[in-house]
Image (cartoon, grey):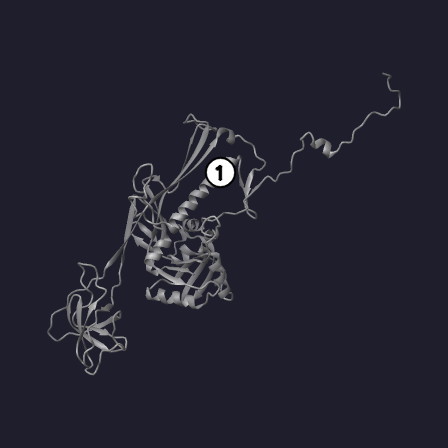
Amino acid sequence: MPIPGPGTAASTAVYTNDLVSSFDILKPDVWAKLIRSHGKQGAEFFSTIRALGFQVPTSNEDYSHFEDDWIHETVGVSNLAAYPAAGATITFDVSNLPAAPAAAYIRVKDQLLLKDGSLVYVTAFSSPTVTIAPLDSTLVFSAANLVNTDELIIISNANGEGTAQPKGRFSGTRKYENNLQIIKETLEVTGTQMTDGLWFNEVQIPGESGTPISAYYVKGQQDAEYRLALEMEGACLFGQKNTNATVAIDPDTGNAIRTTEGIVPYITNEGNEVNYTPGSFTVSKFNEINKIADKEFAPSHYCAFLGIDLHEEIDDTFVDYLKDTNVSFTNDMMGGDQKKGINIGFTYLNKGGRNYAFKRLNSFSNQKTYGANDYNYPAWGLFIPLGMNKTDQGKLPTVGLRYKQLGKYNRFTEVWDVSGAGTGKKVIADDVSNLYLRAHIGGHFQVGNQMFKVNP
């Protein structure tokens, strides 16, 4: 082959992107952040309670407290006798007698006020039958002043000179009881997964600071912790105590599972329900809440956890009155304990002499939990009075969490590793790393009679 002489051009090729990419040697431009497209995904009720410091340890599986009943009681009417002539006596049975062995609240010589303003005098009582006489000799008993289902009020009593003292009266008590629930989560990864490289090194919610991660299993740890928090929130929101002990059993042990009662069943059983028509929420609903709260002698500060639908309706109703504020609950509403002060953004309203702090409960909007199709929790609201009540265990919140603890051993949330892979000590033969999470918690609620469930 002849050797090229001077001036002969060498062969060349065009250095194009297509040519280089055929060797697959270009580094892709991959954003180094894993974006959380669904944000924090809820668990807000649980995290808000924690942020406010509403958690108290217990060394027992079961816990309770007592709440007093009404000091002064009404008299329920049933089995009303036929209406007599003017000025004559009439008998009826007391429909709201307390459980034995407590004595009935009504006594001989009591004065009762009828709904038309007439006064009657108790001349005899042999449980459950009461005999009353009108003080006005012209009074005629009729449907206008006395019927079955009436609640008569005791306003005073009248005694003759030189007579003996009446029997004593005692107000009753109500016992609240709840128990702890064990909740568990697990993350298991292989040693290979622990050494897989990633294109991203940070998990980020848009608009917020990200969380660095060294491997994808680190995000798995975060997800496991989130699932545990979500399950703890579910127990504290909607948990029901297990009364089906022969059927709802742990398949591993055959024993009945222990479950805690959440705030929603508690309000359903002990509190008040206010209904509204979606799209037609009006100021009158707050008047209704305020009147009931007054009857229960509720405090002046309420926190309202609202689903987005109800939150928007209230916002539209009071658009000229609501204001954003940072309410320091533990300082301003619970006795001025500066050490426990924490600021959380709320929308704030004063109506009818009460202060309402509104918190949108995004958990009710989570389309994978309470905001799923066919559930109407985005239209719900939970109105809870705020306060701290002193007990022999210290300050116990109106709405709180209990967790198992004795001495230094705390089971609020336990996280531990049992691994045969990774950089730490190997304690099992399998080529896996197990992250175990456990919570031993329960809800503890007080003064349910002052709470409200607002829903369609």
The image quarter containing residue 390 is bottom left
Check the image and report above or below for 74 versus 409. below
Q: What residue appears at the point 26 percent right and 60 percent down from the top-left corner?
A: 69
Q: Is residue 413 visible?
A: yes
Q: Is residue 445 above or below residue 34?
A: below
Q: Which residue ends up furthest to the bottom in the rendered image?
A: 138
Instruction: Identify the residue position indicated by label 1 in the image.
Output: 220
Task: List the single residue furthest toward the top.
Answer: 1
In the rendered view of the protein, which quadrant contains the C terminus? bottom left
Q: Amino acid at mark 1?
A: Gly
| Left/right of residue 187 with respect to residue 14 in the rendered view | left
Q: Position of residue 450 (x, y in %)?
A: 35, 60
Return the x and y of residue 278 as percentages of the image width and height: 47, 62
Report helix, strand or loop for mark 1.
helix
Residue 447 visible within the image: no
Image vertical order of residue 423 relative to residue 288, above or below? above
Nearer to us in this view, 320 or 148: 148
| Front-most of residues 54 and 34 | 34
Q: Callout 1 environment at 10 Å: few (<14), some (14 to 19), or many (20+)? A: some
Among the 4 quarters of the image, the one containing residue 199:
top right
Q: Which quadrant would the N terminus be assigned to in this image?
A: top right
* 219 left or right, relative to 330: right
Residue drawn at x 35%, y 62% as measured from the top left: 298
Q: Position of residue 305 (x, y in %)?
A: 43, 56
In the rendered image, the vertical position of residue 226 relative to residue 379, given as above or below: above
- Residue at image position (13%, 75%) is 160
Q: At which x and y percent is residue 378?
A: 46, 56
Q: How many marks?
A: 1
The front one of 309 and 29 is 309
